[in-house]
Image (cartoon, rainbow, N blue to C red):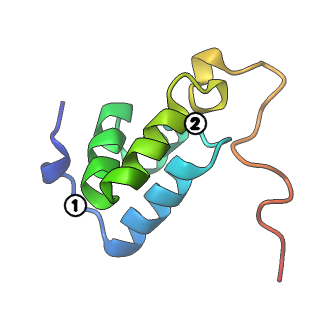
Amino acid sequence: MPKLSKVALSESDISRLIEMAWEDRTPFDAIEKSFGLSESMVIELMRKELKRGSFELWRKRVTGRATKHVALRSDDVNRAYCPTQYKNK
């Protein structure tokens, strides 16, 4: 498995990846599909990029959360985000 240090991400990619990781309905599988980072690599990136308290809050929030793990997710949920999340401004 490649280490995070071997993955080249732009600042905007890192920003978007962090945003996706915080979103409740975006599973780690969608992040992996978009950026090629496994769940463990996302955790490593979040640990590196966030302040310690923010990282700990995020880990507590996503640990065991069904919507972050496709295997735990209900079959009724077939989207990665809330329909009202990306409204036109």
Q: Is residue 48 left or right of residue 26?
A: left
What's the mark number on residue 8? 1
CA distance for labels 2 and 1:
21 Å
Quadrant of the image containing the N terminus: top left
- For residue 50, say whether it is visible: yes
Q: Position of residue 17 (x, y in %)?
A: 45, 56
Q: Classify 10 Å Cα crowding around label 2: few (below 14), some (14-19), many (20 and above).
A: many
- For residue 29, say whether it is visible: no
| N-term-proximal mark, 2 vs 1 | 1
Q: Amino acid at mark 2?
A: Pro
Q: Is residue 84 left or right of residue 15?
A: right
Question: In terms of image quadrants, where is residue 88?
Answer: bottom right
Q: Amino acid at mark 1?
A: Ala
Q: Position of residue 14 (x, y in %)?
A: 37, 63
What's the mark number on residue 39? none
- Residue at horizontal 45 percent and vertical 57 percent from the top: 18
Q: Is residue 72 left or right of residue 59?
A: right
- Residue at horizontal 33 percent and vertical 73 percent from the top: 11
Residue 12 sits above or below residue 74 on the image? below
The residue wearing badge 2 is 27
Q: Position of residue 33 (x, y in %)?
A: 47, 42
Quadrant of the image containing the C terminus: bottom right
CB-based contact (under 8 Å), mark 2 and mark 1: no
- Residue at horizontal 50 percent and vertical 48 percent from the top: 21
Of helix, strand and loop, which one carries label 2? loop
**Total numbered badges shown on the rendered structure:** 2
List the single residue furthest toward the bottom.
89
Of helix, strand and loop, which one carries label 1? loop
Q: Position of residue 5 (x, y in %)?
A: 14, 52
Q: Classify 10 Å Cα crowding around label 1: few (below 14), some (14-19), many (20 and above).
A: few
Between disc 2 and disc 1, the foreground one is 2
Q: Is residue 81 left or right of residue 63?
A: right
